[in-house]
Each structure stands twice: as C-alpha cells, then as structure tokens.
Amino acid sequence: MRRTLLLCCFGARVNAVLAPPSFDRCLQRGLGSWRGAGFTWTPDASASTTIPLAVAPGHITVPSPCSSDVLAEARGAVHAIREERQPSGGVVVVSQQSSTCFSCGSWCEAPRYLGGAGDENHLASALGFGVSVNIAHGDETRKRLLLAVVGGSLASCDVYIEGRAGVAMPESAATLLQRRLQVVVDAKAWEGGMTRRVLSGSPDDGSGWSGAAWEVEESAVEGGAPLLPPNASFQPGGCWVRVVDAVEGGAEEGLVVEVGSLSLESGEVKVVRQKWTGAGGGDGLHLTSVQLSEVTAEAE
C-alpha cells in the first residue's frame, strides 16, 4: 500500500471554452460505456475494512472495479440520460428538467428545496440530503460523486473515476485498483498563469433548469496561485468536497456544497458549486444558484 501526497504544477496547455448549458451536447458527450474504479469515503473509520488516507482526513473502502452504460432515454423525443451502473445494478436517470446539464458532459442534481426539521412534505431536509455530481474532463474521463450531507457536514461520499471503454483506463483508477492511494491536497497554477471561467445560473420557477439564464465570467489566475481550497475533504483521484455556510455574519441562512476535480492529464481543475439560501426563521432553504468553473492554461 502506498499513500502519496502530490504537490503539482500544471504544465499542460489546453484551450477550453466554457459554453452555456446544452442538454443535447451533454448527451453527446456522455453516451457510451465507461469503466474505472470506485470507493466510499467516510470521515472516520466506520468498519474494519476502511483504509485511512493518512495525508488527508478520512477513510475509504477498498477500491473496486466499476462500469456504466449511458443511454439516451426516449419517450417520443430524447429528454433524459439513462445510466445503468455496475456492480451496484443501479439505474440513474438525468433529465434537463430536474438536473443541471452542461455542454462539456458534466451534470449535477440536488434538491431544489431543503425543508426544515419538521417539514415532512419534502424529500430533503436541511438536516440531511443528497447531492449527485458528474464532472467530465477533456481527456474523456469523468468523476462521479454521490454525497450525503448531514447536519451541514459531509457524512459520506461515493466516488467513481471512469474513462471511456475501449481506451486506456484512467491512470488514477488503475492505481486505485492496485491499492495505491494518491491524494492531491495542494496544487499550484502553471508558472505562466492560467484562466478561470465561471458559468453561473439560477433555476427558473416555472421551467426549472431548462429555462435558466446563464452568465460567464473570466479572470486571470497568477502563476503559483493555489488551485485547491483549504479545509476540503480530499479524495483519491484528484477529487474533493467542501460544505460551508453560504452566508457568514448575515441575517440569511444558507449552505454551499462544492465538488471539485483536478485532472493532471487534461491540465484543468473543474468545480461544481451549488448554493441554497433562505430568509431565516426555519422556513427551509431554496437552491438559488449553480456554478461550473474551470481553470485551464491557454494554448499558444
């Protein structure tokens, strides 16, 4: 067993454009068969089979092979992505009405409303809810994370690192299957500088995410600047999760869930950020914004 702490500087140069969300493009990027490795992260040892990360807080179960077959689900017209996953045998349906589907093939799904402790009319409570995120990278790999947030903290996280079947398995997945853990807890921007693009949107009350308005902001990242956040729950394979208060020192209530992925092969960092806010008084929280950000080095 090898536990490795990596401090990395990006030298790859790619040219990426963060496009407005398109369900059709997300569908095109996501279809096909995928294979890789998966594990479950917990904050402390919950069973004798868990492995301590050592270089980062938390434990994981022994990594095992995983695969997914992604299909287009049609009922008159294509309106959803259907994933059949192994070895769990689970089926996941991603629709443009209930999920945020990005043009790069990434998507995320979370409750639109987090009810209060005594609210029994909703499927999710601010005291405990789930978030599903799929982050697609430019090298035909993806990271799938299913989070359980309890009491404002990350309680557990299922992580799957996959690449397209028929090509080489992602190195990070192959490494996991050999029981060699590589956890990236610190990364610096390439010395020549990088670019951060942030795509932000809010759901429409009537039509959900299919009618949302989106904005793109671009900013420069200086060479040597940190690319990973502090105080995150770092996972093997370049993944991390951060759960924080959305509003600090104000009258509002809120919660932010960030899921990030660093890909050394494609030279990019991607983060999906979901924010819930409320007016206070225990009336619950509403999902008010979703962001997809990417940091890349520009091609000359």
Image (tube, rainbow, N blue to C red):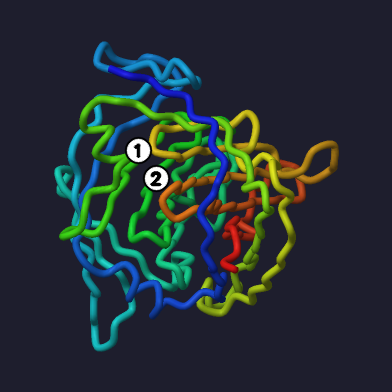
Q: If you read the primary sequence from the N terminus, does the residue marked by circle 2 or circle 1 appear first?
A: 2
Tag 2: amino acid: Leu
Tag 1: amino acid: Asp
Please report the residue visible at 54 percent of the width from the left and 44 percent of the height from the top: 119
User: For numbered disc 2, what is the local secondary structure?
Assistant: strand
Residue reaching furthest to the front = 300
Query: Could you say which disc has been placed on residue 158 in the image?
Result: 1
CA distance separating discs 2 and 1:
6 Å
Does 285 appear above or below 239? below
Residue 10 point in image, percent of width and height: 55, 47
Does 37 appear above or below 28? above
Q: Nearer the viewer, residue 47 or 75?
A: 47
Residue reaching furthest to the top = 48
Please report the residue visible at 28 percent of the width from the left and 50 percent of the height from the top: 162
Does 237 appear above or below 108? above
* Discs 2, 1 touching: Cβ within 8 Å: yes
